Image: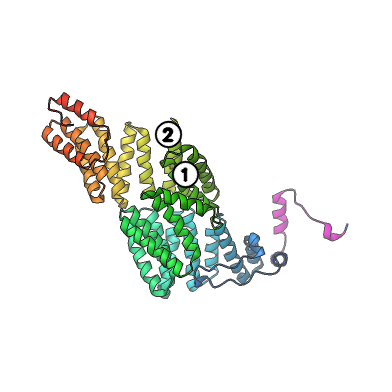
Amino acid sequence: MPSADIAWVFRHALLRDVAYRLQMPADRARLHAQALAGLEALSSGPAPEPPPLVAGDDVPEPHASDAWAEEMAGHAREAGEEAAERRWLRRAAEQAERQARGGAVEMWKRHAELTRGAERGESLRRAGRAAHLAGRSAAAQSLLEEALRIQRGLGQARLEGAALASLAQVFQDTGRWKDAAGLFEEALRLSRAAGDAATEVFALKQQAWLFHLTGLQPEAEATYARALDVARQTGLRRLDFVLRVDLTAFHSRTGREEAAERDLHALLADPRADPRCRGVLLGNLSSILFDTGRFAEAEPLLLEALSLARETGNRSSEALLLGGVTQVLARAGRTDEAIGAMERALALDREMGWRHQEGLHLNALADLLGNAPAAEDAYVRSAAILEDVGDTRHAGVTRGRLAEIRRRLGRPGEAEAEFRHALELHRAAGDRVSEALSLRGLALALLATGRAEEARAAWKQGGEFATAPDGRTDEMREACRRAGVAAFA
């Protein structure tokens, strides 16, 4: 048999490893160099040298070797060819990011070990960004702070701005909104001074969402418009696409569901929507369908979105989508399963350190638990988190629900204090609908403590703000009858 047709196949991995170790180090290095050269030859030669990593968000042109770039980096490392390892590591890390595969964090960290100065800082920023996308918030913060220290020490203002924007995103997603707001402002100042449109657009996009979360809707609208203007004027098509994805969520949460649904269908048809992005888009679309009563259409999209989130390692999206699954299960009367799904979502929130999402999910868990003591505890923890991160609107809603539970459990004094706390939050957030509900709940609590005139005033004030019946009119009439006072409902 010709030697070219002979292939050695090891029956056990242990045998293969022993045979490998028996090779002399110099022989192993030579064989790895030959393997690297062979793979490059199969790919029509080595990949072209990429643009400098510190040049911005430019990525290398695709090459036939990208599919095994990580393997080639390994061969280069074992062959002692540091420059080749560095080149292939970068291609492998960027390929992993594009395909939403694991390993990007470690590859960028290794790339940082092989570089110095500003390029090392940028490698660490990319590692931190990858860690954040993987839900590893603590690791992301550590890597980004080191990247920031390097760029600041070198006087690299543009790259310092990029590191600040990435770190601000971690703070935003982990509920440190005040810190995030300050970092976004600093990142915008530096990026504008350096003419770095990509970082400016990214920071504006994140800042707009932060404005939305904190109830500053006009500011959010204006900031999104500014981000779109900059992206289009500077030809940043990829960021323009990302902005449009973000805007579907913003529009669906601000009363523009029809426009959001139309845009979601268009974005799903766009070839730039990779699997991770498709999962986000399908999740947003399923939420709109669910909220508008189209349950049969929503459920399969929700399950497809959840599958894509898991396939692409999008843990934050997975946690959000599990929240949607609880709605489907609860609507079908499968409350125990719904509670289990929400507890899985909460476990993910805590692993990632996403405190705002944890606060919202604790609220949803409490809703599922009804009037049980565990619901009261969940509302207490939810309200504490939401107030701490600065989500005044949702904190007020949660305080109102906690007050209502305490009222129904026969503790009107505690309920009164909680309703008053909720009212402060509603007024700070400008939430008149929730204010009306809490005033009427407060009226019932006051009547239960024998303060009929105060109850009458609170009930009347709540009626002035109410936009629809809240179902408690009959309850108030019965409460007045039991208290022996003239009905005021």
Instruction: Give the residue type that dot 1 points to.
Output: Ser
Q: Please, which residue is most extreme toward the right here?
A: 1
Mark 2 neighbour class, 10 Å CA radius: few under 14, some 14 to 19, many 20 or more:
some
Which circle marks residue 330 in the picture?
Answer: 2
Q: Residue at x 29, y 46 (%)?
A: 395
Count every numbered label the image shows and give the total: 2
Image quadrant in which the C terminus is located:
top left
Determine if the magenta segment contains residue 201. Answer: no
**On the rendered structure, is 90 left or right of 179?**
right
Closer-to-camera residue (468/301): 468
Determine if the magenta segment contains residue 25. Answer: yes
Q: How is the image coloured?
A: rainbow
Q: Quadrant of residue 74?
A: bottom right
- In the image, residue 440 lies at what x, y percent? 21, 37
Q: Is residue 78 above or below residue 156?
A: above
Instruction: Give the residue type that dot 2 points to.
Output: Ala
Say which residue label 1 marks: 286
Lower sequence index among marks 2 and 1: 1
Q: Residue at x 50, y 47 (%)?
A: 282
The answer to whether any part of residue 110 appears in the image is yes
- In the image, residue 298 lies at what x, y percent? 48, 41
Q: Which residues are magenta?
A: 2-31
Secondary structure of the residue carrying tag 1 is: helix
- In the image, residue 81 lies at what x, y percent? 64, 70
Q: CA distance from mark 2 to mark 1?
A: 16 Å
Closer-to-camera residue (389/213): 213
